[in-house]
Amino acid sequence: METKTFKNKKEFFISPSSPFHFDGTFHKPSHYPNKLSDWKSDRYWQTIRISKRIFGVKIENKGETQKPKIKVSVFYDKNISEDELEKIKQEIIWRFDLNADLKEFNNLAKSDKRFYPIFKKWLGMRNSSAHNLYELLIIAVLLQNATVRRTVQMTNVLLDNYGTKLKFDGKEIFAIWLPEKLNDVSEKELRDLKIGYRAKFIKRLSQDFAEGKIDEPKLRTLDQESAKKEMMKLYGVGPETARILLFEVCHQYNTFDHIAPWQQKIYSRLFYEKPLVSANKIRDNIKKQYGEYSMLAVHYIWEDIFWRRKHEKIDWLEKEIRL
């Protein structure tokens, strides 16, 4: 593991589209606990790579729901160009969907009497992804067929061996390795870290990205079908993973087409207060009610139950997530 300490700092401001919910956008309690970011109310820290160079980022809430403003502090070594600062700014705007136009969605939410209190509570929350496509896929592989506890263990052992620990602003935040860093690492070496069959996926995915098989900036501009086809060129990426990434990476809100069995149990409780409802029924009802915003609507209701979990014990949820 490589360790770097950054003390130099530059700042800029971003004005997200209104309305905006800072904590709901920058902290997703449904995500498994990891060392890749840190959050306290109105403050958020992570690392970010721009053209293979790594930076530390602190983002602070400096506005209000209807008059949003955020302050970004970028930590670095040696020097930083205006071009790099602008690229960091644009990357943050994209990843956290800060320019999203949610007017139609917010109007639609008002017609849902049952869940409107949730939509109102999180008014302005964005579907956001702190990570680039490669990093998201590594996380997706580590989540496959594993309890949350197991995923945390595998993430930590990989970060300890191949990641970078960045010290800045009194924090220690990890960054996932560059794909080419695994060029000379054998599949056996990865397996020896007790990550099982995932070693093959991580090795092959890293090779695909190191060879430039996909252009992420271009991917973000493509229509849904074209983007899906591009992502499925990557090793181990099937239709379901591609569908999830359309929401996470491309901020496409109409991708609620498949429900995994573990999600089905949680959705059944959230939407019907029953232990198990047909996945097709859940999907069809959601799509009928929320249309083009189905995935975003589910995201609000999904995140809300995990925010509640921070303050209260929800027995049925604990049985499903097994942290």
Image: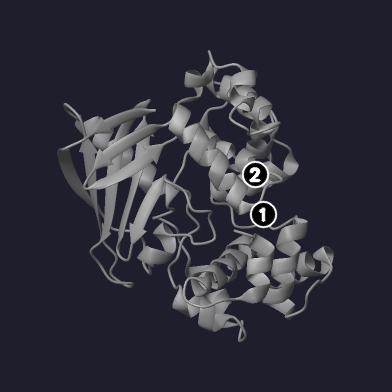
In percent of width and height, residue 136 lies at 54, 41
Provide the secondary structure element on which disc 1 rests: loop
Give residue 238's quadrant in the image.
top right
**Of the pair 89 and 134, the residue shown nearer to us:** 134
Task: Give the alpha-carbon distance from disc 2 to disc 1, as whole Å.
Answer: 9 Å
Front residue (pair 193, 206): 193
Q: Is residue 128 above or below residue 194?
A: below
Give the labeled residue for mark 2: 224
Residue beneath the point at 66% across and 36% down: 226
Assess disc 1: are there few (<14), some (14-19) or many (≥20) residues with their C-alpha within 10 Å of its C-alpha: many
Q: Which mark is residue 255?
A: 1
Q: Amino acid at mark 2?
A: Gln
Q: Is residue 208 above or below residue 80?
A: above
Q: Position of residue 306 (x, y in %)?
A: 54, 68
Q: Closer to the observer: label 2 or label 1?
A: 1
Where is residue 296? Give x, y as percent: 58, 63
Image spot of residue 108 (x, y percent)? 58, 75
Q: Is residue 225 visible?
A: yes
Q: How many badges with numbers are in the image?
A: 2
Residue at horizontal 36%, vertical 46%? 92
In front here: 42 or 97? Answer: 42
- Disc 2 is placed on an element classified as helix
Answer whether labels 2 and 1 touch (C-beta < 8 Å).
Answer: yes
**Where residue 269 is drawn, which disc sits there?**
none
Q: Is residue 110 left or right of residue 3?
A: right
The answer to whether 218 appears left or right of 14 in the picture is right
Relative height, residue 271 to residue 59 (above, below): below
The answer to which quarter of the image holds residue 239 is top right
Q: Is residue 221 visible?
A: no
First of labels 2, 1 by sequence position: 2
Residue drawn 39% across and 48% down? 37
Q: Who's the residue at 64% across and 31% down the image?
A: 230
